[in-house]
Structures are given as C-alpha cells and as structure tokens.
Image: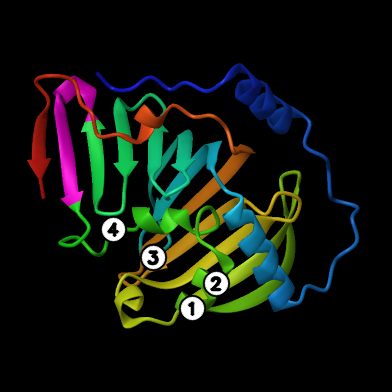
Amino acid sequence: MTPPVTVSGRAAIALAILTFTSPSWSQAPSIDWDLNDAIRQIERQAKDFDSAMARIELVRTDADGNETRRSTGTVFVGDDGDIRYNVDGADRVILVDRNRVMIHTPSAKEVEEYSLRKHKDRLEPFVRLGFSTTGKDLEDDYLLTIRGEETIGSSRTLFLELTPEKNSVREIVRLVRLWIDQASWMPVKQEFNSTNGQTLTLTYTGMARNLKLNPDLFRARWPRGTDRVRK
C-alpha cells in the first residue's frame, strides 16, 4: 500500500504554529548581504538539515509565459534529498530519488518510472536546491548572484540567481532563482528556467524542518497489482 503520511504530534503542532504565527518582516530594515556570508548561512542550514515538510504551489508556464499546469499539495524532503509530493485531489504521488522520478496513480494501479540517466531533462531533482544542497555545492556548480531582498508573504527573503557552471546542468536549466527565508534559511520560492523555454515555479508555505517523518514516505513501495511502466 502507499505509505501513510505520518509525522509526530510535536511536528504537526510545529507546522501549525509556523503556518499561522509567522512574524511579519514588512517593516524590517534591509540588510546589505555579502555573498560569502549568505553561502555560510546556507552551509550551516544544510549541515543541520534532516527533513522538511511544507505546503506547496507548483506552476508551469510555456516559452510564451502561458500557464500550462498548476497544482497544490504537500511536499516532504529527506536528509539525502529524496522528495515526495502528494498532489491535492489529483490521485497522484510523485517520488524523486537520486536515480528516478516515479509518478504513482493509485486509481490506475500504475507507476510511471523515469530514469534520470535517460531523462536528463527532468526538473524535479533541482527542487533539492535550498534544502539538502550545501553552500559549497552551490558555489561549485553555479555562478551565484545576490539580487537583494524581497518579502514573500510573511517572509523576508534573500533573492539569489544561480547560473549553472557545468555544461551538463546548462543542458537542462539556464537559470535558477531562489528566494531563501532569512530566519530559517529554507527556501520560500524556487524558479527554474529550462533550456526549452519552460518555467517551473514552486512556492512554499508552512515550512517546518527536522521533523520525525515516517521513512516509508520516501520508499518506492506500491500496492500489490501496481504496474511499473519504465521510461
């Protein structure tokens, strides 16, 4: 069976508190951030990162800026960068590990399994940026530019642009925009501009980190009778 979504009672309370009582930063003074200081903060967060859970809104647009898909749901991220996305009302669960993207549709008794070795253009693995990715990883793989501060919802964020250094990454994305909460140093918003002109934007709310998540959330265990379609 599809593993249950379980967190500890303390985690659920923490998520509720974060969702409804986040402080407003609208009147906070702007900070003149140094890139090295920002990288060190990201590095500290990544080293202490164990897991995260948040509500998420996902929007895809085409090369002309027209919206092609919008969904909401709950996302879970493990310490090794594994991702689970439970899509609201869509009978769909998406799992991402280091090698695969798996899309489970329970009503169809089917799992589409995409090998990242064959499908290098999949954007899902880039969602790890800002969670388990260290500051050193970002420095090694991207040209980082600070674009200033922006307030998103109740979060005062540091806005970074990431231009891929490696040809293998530039073949997939030409630019990543990352908005990081200055209180938690967790992502509030991510924007991935692909080389084919499409854009994937993810916005997070109610972010809670280092929860005791059920490990089964990230395991590819499907109900008996589920067909695996490898692509």
Residue carrying label 3: 64
Which of 20/51 is in front? 51
Which of 147/140 is in front? 140
Q: Secondary structure at mark 1?
A: helix
Q: Is residue 117 left or right of residue 13?
A: left
Residue range in magenta is 105-114
- Discs 3, 2 touching: Cβ within 8 Å: no
Q: Nearer the viewer, mark 3 or mark 2?
A: 2
Residue carrying label 4: 122
Residue carrying label 1: 140
Q: CA distance from mark 1 to mark 2?
A: 6 Å
Quick one: label 3 or label 1, which is nearer the N terminus? 3
Amino acid type of the residue that numbered disc 4 sits on in the rendered structure: Arg
Amino acid type of the residue that numbered disc 3 sits on in the rendered structure: Asp
Q: Secondary structure at mark 3?
A: loop
**Residue 177: quadrant of the picture:** bottom right
